[in-house]
Amino acid sequence: MLTLIIVSANDYFFPKICWQVKSIETRRRMARDQLQVLNALDVAKTQWYHFTAIIIAGMGFFTDAYDLFCISLVTKLLGRIYYHVDGAEKPGTLPPNVAAAVNGVAFCGTLAGQLFFGWLGDKLGRKKVYGMTLMVMVLCSIASGLSFGHEPKTVMATLCFFRFWLGFGIGGDYPLSATIMSEYANKKTRGAFVSAVFAMQGFGIMAGGIFAIIISSAFEAKFPAPAYEDDPLKSTIPQADLVWRIILMVGAIPAAMTYYSRSKMPETARYTALVAKDAKQAASDMSKVLQMEIEPEQQKVEHISKEKSKAFSLLSKEFMSRHGLHLLGTTSTWFLLDIAFYSQNLFQKDIFSAIGWIPPAKSMNAIQEVFKIARAQTLIALCSTVPGYWFTVAFIDVVGRFAIQMMGFFFMTVFMFALAIPYNHWTHKENRIGFVIMYSLTFFFANFGPNATTFVVPAEIFPARFRSTCHGISAASGKLGAMVGAFGFLYLAQSPDKDKTDAGYPPGIGVRNSLIVLGVVNFLGILFTFLVPESKGKSLEEMSGENEENENSNSDNRTVPIV
């Protein structure tokens, strides 16, 4: 009996021990085979260049968030200025098709930009394309504020045209910033660095609100006006046309300030060595950045390049077998997250109006309404959006991407249902603060959750030659979700009672049922998160399987472990 137990134990444990030893040996061999320049980046201590890269890339995201979300501060004002109806009980509002276009057209441009510049970043290099996106953003931010004419059709058509191209430039920033930061970072703190770039979005949203508060306060002090219910015509001063234009144009300033710094950034070593196949340039660039001597290893690069010339292409059968589920995981989770996130962010002013946190439009003049909307959005950003982002930065390399994303989707689901099911309870005046707290918590866990991790993970798990493209595809899927939220929520959130809908809108399912729909969307996010691999503490080559490709190419016979 004892002999049988010992033999059985040997049969069970010995293959596993052999596999673990073989796995350790394989990892060591992969580390030896890895280029010295890439290994130096992986093990580098946190240095000043890391923070410089975060600031340079992060200011792009600061601008992205300002430009994308500032439109929600001025849509009510645009309705008052250009769609006023004499004798109407309520101030003018944008017609449904115009409101959908103004709110959603930048997302259409962003989606196109993510796909195009993501692909271009893998073809021409990250650095060459990085400056292009910034210049598009600067020019189109200014042009949006200079939208031509005074007639509604002319102004709205030109505004939508320039905001589409503004979104196109913003779209390019997503894959390029994420890819550049992930390829510069060390493997120990890579998640924190990439999420810190994305976290600048929170400051951009907050800056948009603060600037709108300052501008509206200055105009209200200089040009006081009666409420709409007291004098409909005088409640919207002629100078109000300058307010929305200034708010949109200021988004060009932070982007312009970082253009020079971006132009001076060296190309990432992973692109230069693994894609452009120039080991000498990669070693030279990173020697300056890391302030250490790095051997070029051109022969090793040529060997890797020779093997990769036989490697699979994007979306090929081999790619889909290796990375297909990963791509499905990153695209689906980002898509679902952005349906919920952008629906909340773009239309939180409507929710605040519904619970009475923002007074009825007719009780304010046009400038006062801008102030109240900006104040509400700034408070949400300050209390939940910004802290959520930086909680992710602090913990992403401690607990990992998977845990944070799963937790975020879970709590977003819980709080959405907690808001929706007893919705009538929250509309009572004495319960409004509770509603705002619950609503803020959904934002907190969106940002200390999938809003950050869906940005980080696609920049880590795909091969260098596809990294920017795959991140662009994942991000474009997210913006498709944002468009569903931006266009769909305009109609869904309308009251089921046709007498209580906004002018020009058909009856919808109401805010309560819309929140239930968003809760279901968040629950689906939990399920699709299981397709996303954990990348904490691993090198980019280990995650993407590039080391494995090189290892396999050096061995004719691959040993299959017996488990």
Image (tube, rainbow, N blue to C red):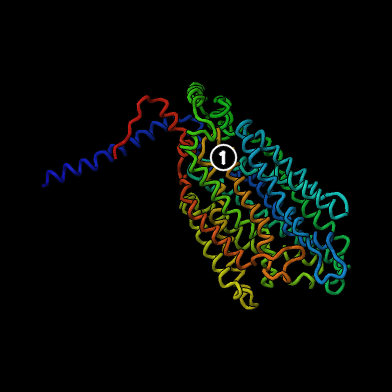
| x and y, in percent, of residue 283 in the image | 55, 28
Residue at x 56%, y 70% (from the top left corner): 421
Query: Which of the pair 140/28 is nearer the observer?
Result: 140
Relative horizontal placement of residue 275, taking residue 369 as reference (left or right): left
Residue at x 66%, y 66% (from the top left corner): 351
| x and y, in percent, of residue 167 in the image | 70, 46
Q: In which quadrant of the rendered view does residue 26 lie?
A: top left
Please identify the quadrant where the C terminus is shown.
Answer: top left
Q: In which quadrant of the rendered view does residue 72 lie?
A: bottom right
Q: In which quadrant of the rendered view does residue 171 lie?
A: top right
- How dense is the environment of label 1, judged by Cα within 10 Å: few (below 14), some, or many (20 and up)? many
> Which three-letter amino acid code belongs to the residue tagged 1?
Cys
Query: Which of the pair 465/524 is nearer the observer?
Result: 524
Number of callouts? 1
The reply to whether residue 398 is in sight is: no
Q: Residue furthest left?
A: 1
| x and y, in percent, of residue 245 in the image | 81, 54
Q: Which residue is mark 1?
A: 470
* Residue 160 to residue 385: above or below: above
The reply to whether residue 558 is in sight is: yes
Query: Which of the pair 165/87 is nearer the observer?
Result: 87
Query: Which of the pair 545/383 is nearer the observer?
Result: 545
Residue at x 54%, y 56% (from the top left corner): 448
Relative horizontal placement of residue 503, taking residue 148 as reference (left or right): left
| x and y, in percent, of residue 254 in the image | 72, 47
Residue at x 68%, y 49% (from the top left corner): 107
Relative horizontal placement of residue 406, taking residue 162 as reference (left or right): left
**Element type at mark 1:** helix
